[in-house]
Structure formats: structure tokens, C-alpha cells
Amino acid sequence: MGYGLLNLLFVYMVFSLMLAVFNLVYLRQLKRERRHRENARRLLQAGRARLRKALTEKGTRAERRRIRRFSMVRYLGRFEEELKEVAAYDPALVRAYFQKYEAEYMMLIVPIQKMGVTEKTMYARLVMKYGINADQKSAAFAAAMIRLMDRSSMFLMYNVLGALAVMGMPEALSDALKVMTEQGFYCYSKVTTNALMWYAGSRNELLLLLLKNQNEYNPEIRCALLEYARKEKGPYKRDILRILENGSENLEVRLEALRYFIKYPSIEAEEVVRKLLLERKTMDWRYAALGVKVLAAFPSAENRALVRTLTHDPIWYVHQNATEAWKQMERGHA
């Protein structure tokens, strides 16, 4: 009996300790959340007061003097936090502020060019988020933005490309991609695609221009363009079909072309893909793995027989995709 009471007491003490720890963690979490809300409220109040004062005649001179100090990280970073809070509650105030001081912020690029990657990244992000030069479309400013790029920072490249996209300047974007190619800057295709998604003008016009100049870009950028084309339905099939037809084309670029035709089927692409699959033994297996998905949209007897043979392929991805494509074709044929 004594041991039973001791066991109960031990369980009770462990449970009490766990409850106390849980309450302590919960209270700390509440305290952090309260502190975060208080900080956000202070930033919102400070930001609103600063922007409203800057829009008055009396505060203009002091604001211009303050902007010149933004080349230092601590000032620019703090101001970005304030802007983020104000933009969420009073976007009209932020727009009015940047319309008045756009020229001053554009002039900041001169000292920023001599600074480090951190300052350049923060400045490019500010330009992207608040549409600096979106109305003026200064070619000189766009060229200066391109010169900010550095091979050591993919995030900087993303912000610069995003800023040029927000400006709605397709030629400047094309020049930036050429510079990245010429200077050997590497940027993941998905990062480049996400930056292009900020484009403020006609995305069809942008893509047609970039596809026209695609041979001047490296394979990673060209893959990004094809990813972008998959997101934007438009008249790109002819350009992308030429990529697929070119046997000397980069492998990854041709695979992206296949992914495009999986989403947007084409009779012309079907013929090219059928020829690729007929050469399965001499071609990279990835052509077959994606090609069967293209043929799934065209359930002719010839295509069904070809895909059926690939359901026994030794490569698992080819076998799996071919099996799914064949089932889809059978349903479509029936």
C-alpha cells in the first residue's frame, strides 16, 4: 500500500511539473506576441507621423536630409520596417510619400553603388516594393540598377530583376539577363521566374521579347523563361517548338519545353515527341518520362502502342509515367 501511494505521489509531482512548464512556455509565448504587437503599433505610429510630417512644406527639407543618410544600413532597415506597417494600414499615404520623394530615392543609387551587397540588396528591395521609377521609366536609372548585381548574392539579383519588372521595362530586363549571362552570374531558374512575376506591364509582350533574345541567355535563364511561359498562356508554342525540335539544344532547356507541351498540348509537338520516343534506346530517359505525358493528350492507335511498350521500361520513372499515360489514353479512346 505504501508503494502505491508513493507511485501516485510521484505521478502527481511529474504531472504538476509538466503543467508548470507548459504554463511557463505559454506565458512566454503570450509575452512575445504582446511585445510583437506593441512593436508593430509603435512602428505604425512612428511611420505614419514621419510620412505625414514629410508631406508638409515644413518637413520637406528635413526629410530630404534624412533620405541622404539611408545609404547606411541601420537607417534604411529601420525605415523599411516602418513602411511595412504603414503600407498595410494606409497604402495611400505611402504612395503619396514616394511620389513626392521619388527623385531623392533615385539619386541614392549613386552612393549605394559603392557600398556592400547588404546595402545594395536592401536598396533594390525598396525600389521593387514601392515602385520607384515605375512612372518615369528612366533608362539611366534602370542601367544603374543592373550594375548593382553581384555574383555573390542571388537575393540581390532577385531584387534587381524584380525592381526592373515593377518598372515595366522589358528591354532593361533583357539587358539584365544578358549581363548575368556574360558575367557568369548563377541564379536558380525558379528565383528568376519569381522575379519576372513582378512584371507590371503586358507579360505576353515581355515573354515574346525574351524568347526572341533567348539565345543570348544561359540555359538556367532560358529554363526560367519556359517556366514563366507555363504560368502565362500566350502565343509561345512556335518558339518553344523550335527548342524541342533542335537536337543540339541544352538538355534541361528541352525538358522544360516538354513540360510546357504537357500543359499546352500541340499537334506539332506530338510529332516531335513521337520521334523522340521511337529513339528511346539512344536518348536520355528523361525525354521518355516526360514525352509519354505529352502523348497522353493524343490517344491514337499508334501513340497507344508506343506508350504501351514503355510501360515495361527498366527506368522506374518512365515505367510509372507511361503506365499512367496509357491508362489516360485508354479512357480517352473509350
Image: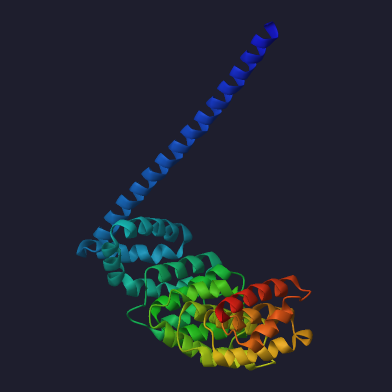
* Residue 180 screen position, x and y as percent: 58, 81
User: Is residue 332 visible to the viewer in this orientation of the structure?
Assistant: yes
Q: Nearer the viewer, residue 322 or 64?
A: 322
Residue 91 in the image: above or below residue 198: above
* Residue 141 screen position, x and y as percent: 42, 81
Report which quarter residue 107 is drawn in.
Answer: bottom left
- Residue drawn 72% across the image and 73% down it: 319
Residue 176 in the image: above or below residue 327: below
Residue 283 in the image: above or below residue 121: below
Report which quarter residue 327 is drawn in.
Answer: bottom right
Residue at the limit of the structure toward the front, as seen here: 334
* Residue 235 screen position, x and y as percent: 46, 89
Residue at the limit of the structure toward the top, as seen here: 2
- Looking at the rendered image, the quarter that the C terminus falls into is bottom right
Q: Nearer the viewer, residue 211 or 129?
A: 211
Scheme by which the image is coloured: rainbow
Is 43 situated left or right of 247 in this image?
left
Q: Nearer the viewer, residue 229 or 100?
A: 229
* Residue 192 screen position, x and y as percent: 54, 75
Q: How many marks?
A: 0
- Residue drawn 59% across the image and 84% down it: 299
Report which quarter residue 57 is drawn in.
Answer: bottom left
- Residue drawn 63% across the image and 76% down it: 325
Residue 67 in the image: above or below residue 146: above
- Residue drawn 55% across the image and 68% down it: 155
Q: Nearer the viewer, residue 54 or 9?
A: 9
- Looking at the rendered image, the quarter that the N terminus falls into is top right
User: Is residue 114 visible to the viewer in this orientation of the structure?
Assistant: no
